[in-house]
Each structure stands twice: as structure tokens, then as C-alpha cells.
Image (spheres, coloured by chain):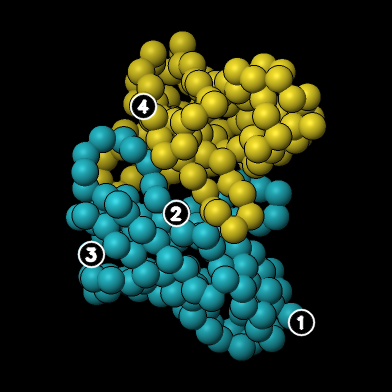
């Protein structure tokens, strides 16, 4: 069974204070690891897809990295508008369009 | 951009009622999904469909059914709503379901069953 564990559950940072969110996974053949951002009362919004260990992707203050067992979402000099819940999800190579397995998310608060 | 539209933002229903949640996507995507999201449990897959009139059970299908009569529309049906089905319901779609393809989500329907 595919499993995704995110840590910490919640994180409070000061504006400009860089940090990392962790996503560890167990999956039978990784097709892709996804990061989503979710604002309160809204659906998840796609950020990144990573396919293989060693891959990195960046978008503004966010950088996602991938190893064989985990992924990190690094947030550099965050701003209050980066406050959101960040979700990690995996897609296994079992075949078929069977969606994603999600972690429970990290609730990030950036204080001015 | 792909748009996934869920018909209701908030719904309040009574125990035992039949409830329909509607979802429409405008980009000719083959695959559509229904998730529910609960605090502390994250997103869990209820049902998905990879073609018109096709459906597959996800991780928590009990108490739900789905209908996909047209490619753009995917409905979630609660045959007899119960209080433990109070949740945020999220519809999503993807183009083909191939390698590493992302999902596009709607804004969600917050369902309260009283």
C-alpha cells in the first residue's frame, strides 16, 4: 500500500525565515511525486511534479527536491502570502488512471 | 487554463436524503476523480472514471456511487446521506492519466449532513 507522510503537521515562521517541509513516501514504483498548495476553502493548486531521484524544480521562493525515499519543499525568505497548506502526493506505477495518494499536509503560517 | 467547476460551494442536507454533487470540466479530460477531505485524514479517493460510463472504486467507496454519462461531467451520489459523510468534497480531472500527470481540482463542496 502506498503511503505518504508529511512533517511537520504545522509550521509557523517569521517573514524571511527560510525552512523546509518534508514528505517521505513508500510506493511500489514511483511515476511522479507532486506538490500542491491549498488555500483555506479552496481546492489544491498544482506546484511541481518530480519524477526521479536527484531532480529539482523551482518556482519563485519554492524549491522542490526528490530522493528515493523523500521529497523536500524548501521555502526561501517566505512572505505572508506563502501561508497555506502544502500537500505532497505520489502516483504509483501500477498502471491505470487511479489518481494520487496524498499526505495529510503541512499547514504553514508566515507571520509578518 | 483548465477549469473544473463544482456546482455548489456549500450544501446542507438531512440524514437519509439523496444528495447529488456535480462536477464539470472544460478541457476534454479523460479522467475524473472524487476525493473527500477531512481534518487529520487528508484527501481520500472515493471513485474515479477514465472514460464515459466507466467507473472504478477508490479507497473509500462505501455509501457513494457515481455517474459519468458525458465526458465533461462526473457526478457523485450519496444514496442516503449520513452524518459521517459531512466533509469537503473535491472533484479533479486529468488529461490521460499517463506518467506523472497532474490533477486539476475544483474549489470544493462543503457538505454538512444534519
- In front here: A96 or B29? A96
Report, in whole angstroms, how far the alpha carbon at label 2 lies from the one at label 1: 30 Å
| Residue at numbered disc 1 | A112
Q: How many circles with numbers are drawn on the protein?
A: 4
Report, in whole angstroms, how far the alpha carbon at label 2 lies from the one at label 4: 18 Å
Q: Secondary structure at mark 3?
A: loop
Colour representing chain B: yellow
What is the chain letter for disc 3? A
**Dot placed on the residue nearer the N-terminal end, 3 or 2:** 3
Give the residue at x 67% y 29%: B82
Q: Is residue B80 left or right of residue A61?
A: right
Badge 2 density bin: few <14, some 14–19, many ≥20, Cα 10 Å? many
| Residue at numbered disc 2 | A102
Q: Secondary structure at mark 4?
A: strand
- In front here: B7 or A25? A25
Q: Which chain is cyan?
A: A
Q: Is residue A61 above or below residue B28?
A: below
| Residue at numbered disc 3 | A52
- The percent coordinates of residue A100 (x first, y second) are 39, 47
Give the residue at x 33% y 72%: A70
Give the residue at x 55% y 86%: A18
Same chain for mark 4 and mark 3? The answer is: no
Give the residue at x 35% y 18%: B54
- The percent coordinates of residue A90 (x first, y second) are 35, 55
Amino acid at each position: 500500500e502506498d503511503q505518504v507522510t508529511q512533517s511537520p503537521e504545522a509550521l509557523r515562521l517569521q517573514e524571511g525565515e527560510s525552512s523546509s517541509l518534508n514528505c517521505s513516501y513508500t510506493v511500489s514504483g514511483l511515476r511522479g511525486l507532486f506538490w500542491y498548495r491549498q488555500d483555506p476553502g479552496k481546492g489544491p493548486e498544482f506546484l511541481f511534479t518530480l519524477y526521479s531521484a536527484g531532480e529539482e524544480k523551482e518556482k519563485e521562493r519554492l524549491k522542490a527536491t526528490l530522493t528515493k525515499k523523500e521529497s523536500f519543499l524548501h521555502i526561501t525568505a517566505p512572505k505572508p502570502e506563502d501561508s497555506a497548506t502544502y500537500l505532497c502526493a505520489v502516483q504509483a506505477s501500477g498502471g491505470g488512471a487511479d489518481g494520487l495518494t496524498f499526505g495529510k499536509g503541512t499547514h504553514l503560517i508566515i507571520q509578518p | 487554463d483548465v477549469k473544473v467547476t463544482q456546482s455548489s460551494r456549500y450544501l446542507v442536507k438531512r440524514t437519509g436524503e439523496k444528495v447529488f454533487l456535480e462536477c464539470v470540466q472544460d478541457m476534454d479530460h479523460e479522467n475524473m476523480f472524487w476525493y473527500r477531505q477531512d481534518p487529520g485524514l487528508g484527501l481520500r479517493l472515493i471513485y474515479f472514471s477514465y472514460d464515459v460510463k466507466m467507473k472504478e472504486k477508490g479507497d473509500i467507496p462505501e455509501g457513494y456511487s457515481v455517474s459519468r454519462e458525458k465526458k465533461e461531467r462526473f457526478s457523485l451520489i450519496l444514496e442516503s446521506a449520513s452524518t459521517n459523510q459531512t466533509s469537503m468534497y473535491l472533484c479533479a480531472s486529468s488529461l490521460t492519466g499517463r506518467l506523472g500527470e497532474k490533477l486539476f481540482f475544483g474549489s470544493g463542496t462543503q457538505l454538512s449532513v444534519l
